[in-house]
Amino acid sequence: MNIFEYILFTIIVLTVMILPIVWCRYTWRLRYLQKMALFNILRRQQKSLEPQFYASYVINQCVNLLYKKHTKKAKRALAQLVGGRVNAAAKELSAHYRLMSLLLLAHENPLQAYRKIYKDKKLLHAKDNQALLRLLAQSVWVCQADGDNCNLSQNRNGIIKAYELFAQAFFHLQNADLRQAASNTEKALKKFRYHNYLYEEAQCYLRLADIYRFCCMYDLSFSMLEAAQYIFDKQNLSGQLAQVIAAKGVQMLSEGRYDEAQQYYQSAINTTQNERIKNEILNQYALLEIVRKQYSSARKKLSRSLPFFKQYQNANGVGFSLQLLGQISYEQQHYIAATKQLIKASDEYKKVKNFSACCECFYLIACIYFRKQKYEKAENILHEILQISQKYLHSFHVADVYSLLGLIYMETEKYTLAKEMFEQSLQLELKHNRNDGVAVDYLNLSRVEHKLENYDAATADARLAMEYAQKSDNVELIELIKNKMMI
């Protein structure tokens, strides 16, 4: 071997040895910077008084893009991004990566970023990041009115597919398709786990907890909340931790365990210093007080939360506070005040296209007119809700509308129409496995059949009402059926 061959051999050997070391150092440093950026942006969001958007994929991509640049401006922007400040990085990336820069900016101000994207039709219809745009829209409650954005891409894999599944689950939840919502969320959860996206993993647990709670699967729901709490506690994220604890309070309220719900709400309020989150929890606490018929205590809590949400122009917060005040006025039979408060609440919800909450307000107004025996006005409002349900995706339970329409037709002696309405309500209740609702519908059908002198059918419906009431373990409903039908 001559000297030239020896030098060439040495260079090859050193290259083979050094390149993996250099590559490992490069990737280790990149991952470290990404991890720091993810953590510090979340920490800064703890202080925000606005609803927040967060996507680990966007942050990682932006760190990666800036890391590859070697200009002084890029390095300064990267340093600020790693420290949790996104503005400089978004500005640096805006020339060549406009959509990614706006999605990064959304971590600071989601509504402003969404408005900028919405103005640019090319960005709004960009196929590559539709899932992230949906998540951004959902974070500011700008729910899409049509179904075009609900279809999953068939040719996408990896982490973007996980975001698509998670966004799709939101639409299924809005449309009360709990089975499909759970399926998509579970698929997204597996992908987020694989990529070690902890924040998104915790959000999947929270969504599954809501779905299981709606299905009255309380043990599963609570275990999902425990899993989310573990992640947020480990990352020392007090705001998200408070929201999980408050979600436990919501579950206790659903189960009728009011004292435990109160303890969770108090604990959640003491966990965070974020005033927005505190006031959101205060509203939930006020709902608990309404259920317990502690109306003065509920009003006191709402008198604290409503001015805060008005100050920061938080439409959902203002709307929910007014809706709860309307509920209190309704329970106390102050119908004029209740109607005004509910109309104002629906106006706030319309600003952010929160049609589920709009329907809830309209439904309560219809209940007011029903109580006041103004059946025509109540009927018109209920038909308006049905029109909204056909045009927009929402999670309002339409069976309640058909049930109330049936009661209106019963009062106006339109028994055939009443029967049709109760049957439509029954089909929806059976579809969503709501045994309480099924029992009530069978009870109402029994009353209609009795009025139509179909006594055998009336008896059969009454027995089915009792059967489903017993399945639901609702003692009050069982007693009601016994008293009404004398079984």
Image (cartoon, grey):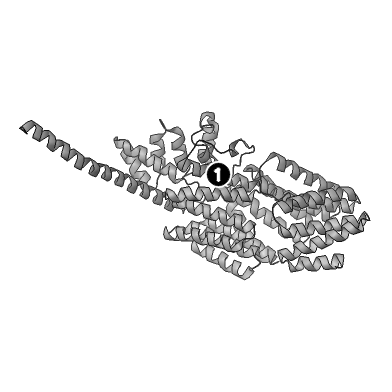
Report how many numbered discs are placed on residues in the image: 1
The quadrant of the rendering that contains the C terminus is bottom right
Query: Which of the 4 image quarters holds residue 98?
Result: top left
* Residue 124: x %, y % from top left: 53, 33
* Residue 164: x %, y % from top left: 53, 42
Q: Crowdedness of circle 1 by 10 Å Cα count: few (<14), some, many (20+)?
A: many
* Residue 322: x %, y % from top left: 67, 53
In the image as oriented, which residue stretches furthest toward the top? 122
* Residue 470 in the figure: left or right of residue 239: right
* Residue 329 in the figure: left or right of residue 129: right
In the image as oriented, which residue stretches furthest toward the bottom? 259
The quadrant of the rendering that contains the N terminus is top left
> Which residue is depicted at the point 27% across and 45% down?
24
Decide if residue 341 is in sight here: no
* Residue 104 in the figure: left or right of residue 176: left
> Please, is residue 327 above or below residue 181 in the view?
below
Q: Secondary structure at mark 1?
A: helix
In the image as oriented, which residue stretches furthest toward the left? 2
> Which residue is depicted at the point 73% across and 66% down?
474
Q: Which residue is mark 1?
A: 167
Which of 367 and 472 lies nearest the eye of the viewer?
472
Type of amino acid at the residue the image marks with label 1: Ala
In the image as oriented, which residue stretches furthest toward the right? 453
Decide if residue 302 is in sight here: yes
* Residue 77 in the figure: left or right of residue 433: left
Which of 352 and 196 lies nearest the eye of the viewer?
196
Which of 471 and 299 lies nearest the eye of the viewer?
471
> Which residue is depicted at the point 63% across and 59% down?
302
Which of 352 and 472 lies nearest the eye of the viewer?
472
* Residue 12: x %, y % from top left: 17, 36
> Which residue is depicted at the point 60% across and 66% down?
261
> Please, is residue 319 above or below residue 244 in the view?
above
